[in-house]
Image: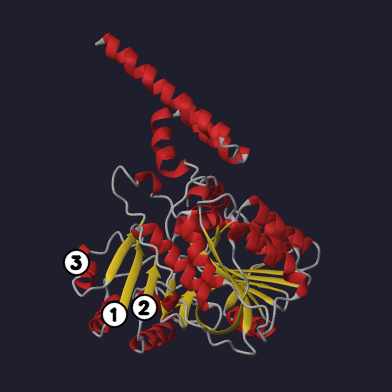
Amino acid sequence: MQVLSILFLTIYTLAIVGVILVIITDNRNPLKSVPWIIVLLLAPVVGLVFYFFFGQNLSKQRIISRRTRRRINTRLEVRGDIDCPRIPERWAPLSELLVNTIQAVPLYGSRITPYTDGRSKMDALCEAIANARHHIHLQYYIFCDDRTGRNLRDLLIRKAREGVEVRILYDDVGCARVKKRFFKAMRREGIEVRAFLHVQFPLFTSKVNYRNHRKIVVIDGRIGFLGGMNIADRYIDGPGWGTWRDTHFRIEGGGIAGLQASFLSDWSATTKQPIADAAYYPAPTLFADGAALQLVAGGPFGKWRTLLQGESYAIANARRRIWIQTPYYLPSEVLNTALQTAALAGRDVRLMLPERSDARIVNLASHSFLDDMLKAGVKILFYRPGFLHSKLLIVDDDLTVIGSANMDFRSFEHNFEVNAFVYDRDFTDRMSAIYEADTAQCHAVTPNEWFHRPRYRRIMESFLRLFAPLM
């Protein structure tokens, strides 16, 4: 018995030492490495469990082969003679950054239609699906078995019976509460339904922290949707204590190829069945007054954190203004410093957050970052009518970033996200008008009121901030 105890302690100690060596040799930011080492030394049992679930560095892993990715991205080659607005010269370095880090090639001639409420978005989505002729590709973090989800399910089943190819990707954690029979009903009708990074012990348990937060729809390779809304009643009816303010977009034109490539990359990673046929990339209708954009599919695999790098670059190079909407503000040091620096340099920096959130703990942690923001001159706006779930970054007059990513650690470090960097004055004007309309329903926080909030609340915010990278 004593021998077994010694053997167990020896193996256990070697495991702890081994994990610490892995953390050290990963050459991560010391601000990330040191806390993990301290936890493993002071609470080794808890530390091992948490590291297994939340701490592993997956940047060197691949979920799709280079060969498959090349086959899919080959369809994104764009002719050089397209008569459409191009990327402004001042943003050429940003464009090159997105190409060099994640092969997000510029796409031209896109018409983009915004939706600011769940009902109008679902009506537009269902109408486009009803007119589908060849294929329907859907990818959502949450696909609920409620009125909204069942209506969409029934529509997809009807299209599958008409002979239209239907493929669905959903996130296994995001849909954890959805009964299996909901998806089985679609599979029985010939719809291909797959869970991304299926959580099945022990094979994928270590990847439970890496979720697919993308919301992508591609119909016949000609119409696409992306943004912040999932498939659930609350995006239409509200969270139960107010309205649900969100933003989603319909895209037509050249940008569709980028959405298709993102979906098919995830489909290939999930099913190991690459799809790169020309039928899924029909020649787009390019709009002469359409926007130039780059579709950036960020994720935890790979060396670069392109969404964080791209948005940080845009913020650092702003000349006049930086307007942001995000439901959660848990930024990296790089992003936080960039925004404070911009405000101190006289830029018009505005950060719009929900006054009340669907995640109270995350909301409190977000507030811990606002002290320094206010001191730097950032205008903090709290949206009051309900929950603000919109994700939006407006820089100056010709760059708007839209998509699924929040401004937090999870979106930039752990989740699979997709954002569009849109280079277009007209579109930026339209989104600015929407932002200003939302501002009219906000409370502008003053330094005096903020710095006099209760001490117990400030302590709670600071404590929860310690866990920001895990939220």
Q: Within 10 Å of the Cα at label 2, are there few (<14), some (14-19), or many (20+) other Cα atoms?
A: many
Q: Residue at x 43, y 69 (%)?
A: 276
Q: Position of residue 294 (x, y in %)?
A: 60, 71
Q: Name the residue under label 3.
A: 181
Closer to viewer: mark 3 or mark 2: 2
Residue ID for mark 2: 136
Between the C-alphas of marks 3 and 2, the distance is 21 Å
**Do labels 1 and 3 touch, CB within 8 Å?**
no
Crowding at label 3, few (<14), some or many (≥20) Cα neighbours within 10 Å?
Answer: few
Q: Do the residues labelled 3 and 2 touch (CB within 8 Å)?
A: no
Label pair 1/2, CB-CB below 8 angstroms: yes
Residue 135 x/y as whole percent: 36, 79
Above or below — where is 42 with respect to 147?
above
Residue 19's spot in the image, x, y percent?
Answer: 47, 30
Q: Is residue 111 left or right of residue 89?
A: left
Q: Looking at numbered disc 1 in the image, what kind of residue is underneath it?
A: Leu
